[in-house]
Image (cartoon, grey):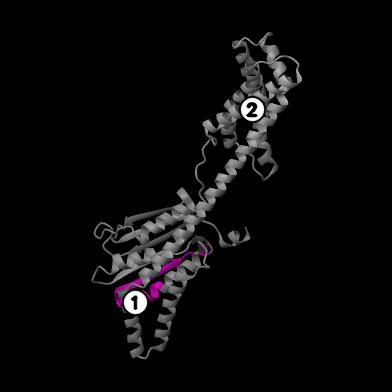
């Protein structure tokens, strides 16, 4: 679910609306006066032409903004029959009411200007019966125009949101690759592979090289979508953990637990591996003794919970700047889910740091079907 920008309830600038109304009104008055001058009939002065033709356009311009505001709150959308009838049940009475209010305002102004020879109620009925169809057409024209503006803004917002998601995912891939290609990390990994080779453990060497290639391939694979099944995400973490366990030996033990029913949940690509990397780097590497990292993922109703904890000194002892592991993950969760997802950092009661990610559950099979 993409988060769409909050749309203004007044989609048109007042200056533009009154400018267009004035332009059409003056044009209509000029043609009306010119027509009477050419073909005769009842003499029409310039004030008469402005009153009869320009004033209605200005009154209509004044009503354009509240009509547009109501249209933004109750837009006409496709879908089921009720999705169409529900807004119309409001707009049709409002359109009829607008005709009477428009006629009343116009006739009141006529009485103020001394151009209304008969009672107000009669003038209102005359205006509604004579020009009501045109005002109904005007109301629904504004309704349709407002819908077009709203649709355009939503499409533009979704396009911008998609671009931000793609840029954020690309940044995560680049940062993950950069961190994994850190010279110290790469040197230790290759050194460990060399030791295994000297021992003649060819199977371990092949496994380590294979795991390293999996991480690099996932970081560079542009075919991976912004959302991937949680099982694939945990498998990538498993590849990263295998190399780290080879690097740290007995100093590091990692437990991965993917609860049944959560493996098909869609999660942002590379959302877990940076958190595990933070746990290893800031929780295990900074202490001399052995340490433990636990990664668990489960589903709680409509929520997926991913938890990464370590037995290190915790956040208070080792302040961690929000780099790739936290700020990038937090930003991508915000881009994907808005307020429906969160990332919480805390110290574990028994010691160490805990990072927990909460995000809405969405099955990969349902996403593929849609």
Residue at position x 37%, y 61% in the image? 324
Q: Quadrant of residue 141?
A: top right
Query: Of helix, strand and loop, which one carries label 2?
Result: helix
Q: Residue 231 location in percent, x, y?
A: 50, 67
Q: Which residue: 50% across, 45% down?
A: 5
Residue 19 highlighted magenta (yes or no): no
Q: Which percent across, then down, holds residue 26?
A: 62, 25
Element assignment for label 1: helix
Q: Mark 2 or mark 1, which has the lower sequence index?
A: 2
Number of residues whose C-alpha sits closer than 10 Å to that of mark 1, classed few (under 14), some (14–19) or many (20 or more):
some
Where residue 186 is drawn, which disc sits there? 1
To which residue does mark 2 refer? 27
The answer to whether residue 301 of the structure is visible from this angle is: no
Q: Is residue 114 left or right of residue 132?
A: left
How far apart are the two marked residues, 2 and 1, measured between alpha carbons?
76 Å
Q: State the residue lying farthest toward the front.
A: 38
Q: Determine whether 83 is above or below 312 in the image.
A: above
Total marks in image: 2
Answer above or below: position of 260 versus 194: above
Residue 144 versus residue 39: which sits nearer the camera?
Answer: 39
- Which one is closest to the eye, mark 2 or mark 1? 2
Looking at the picture, tell me which residue is in the foreground, 39 or 276.
Answer: 39
Q: Which residues are magenta?
A: 240-263
* CA neighbours of label 2 inside 10 A, class few (<14), some (14 to 19), many (20+): some
Residue 267 visible here = yes
* Pointer 2 with pointer 1, Cβ within 8 A: no
The relative height of residue 85 versus residue 101 in the rendered view (above or below) is: below
Identify the image quadrant of residue 209.
bottom left
The image shows residue 345 at horizontal and vertical percentages of 34, 55
Residue at 69% x, 31% y is 137
């Amino acid at each position: 679910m993409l988060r769409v920008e909050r749309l203004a309830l007044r989609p048109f600038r007042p200056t533009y609306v009154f400018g267009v109304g004035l332009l059409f009104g003056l044009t209509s008055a000029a043609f009306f006066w010119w027509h009477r001058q050419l073909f005769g009939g009842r003499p029409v002065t310039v004030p008469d032409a402005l009153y009869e033709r320009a004033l209605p356009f200005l009154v209509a311009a004044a009503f354009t903004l509240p009509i547009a505001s109501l249209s933004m709150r109750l837009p006409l959308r496709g879908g089921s029959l009720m999705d169409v009838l529900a807004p119309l049940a409001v707009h049709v009475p409002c359109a009829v009411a607008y005709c009477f209010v428009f006629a009343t305002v116009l006739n009141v102004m006529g009485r103020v200007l001394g151009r209304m020879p008969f009672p107000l109620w009669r003038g209102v009925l005359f205006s509604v019966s004579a020009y009501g169809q045109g005002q109904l057409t005007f109301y629904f024209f504004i309704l349709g125009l407002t819908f077009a503006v709203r649709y355009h803004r939503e499409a533009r917002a979704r396009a911008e949101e998609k671009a931000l998601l793609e840029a954020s995912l690309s940044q995560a891939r680049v940062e993950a690759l950069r961190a994994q290609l850190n010279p110290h990390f790469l040197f230790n990994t290759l050194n460990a592979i060399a030791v295994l080779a000297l021992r003649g453990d060819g199977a371990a060497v092949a496994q380590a090289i294979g795991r390293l290639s999996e991480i690099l391939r996932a970081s560079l694979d542009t075919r991976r979508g912004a959302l991937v099944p949680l099982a694939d995400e945990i498998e990538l973490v498993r590849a990263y953990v295998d190399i780290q366990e080879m690097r740290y030996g007995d100093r590091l033990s990692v437990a991965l637990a993917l609860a049944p029913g959560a493996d098909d949940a869609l999660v942002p690509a590379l959302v877990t591996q940076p958190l595990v990397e933070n746990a290893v780097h800031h929780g295990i590497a900074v202490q001399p003794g052995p340490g433990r990292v636990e990664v668990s993922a489960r589903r709680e109703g409509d929520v997926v919970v991913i938890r990464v904890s370590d037995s290190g000194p915790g956040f208070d002892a080792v302040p961690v700047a929000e780099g790739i592991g936290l700020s990038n993950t937090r930003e991508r969760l915000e881009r994907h889910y808005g307020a429906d997802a969160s990332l919480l950092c805390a110290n574990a009661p028994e010691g160490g740091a805990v990072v927990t990610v909460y995000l809405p559950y969405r099955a990969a099979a349902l996403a593929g079907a849609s």
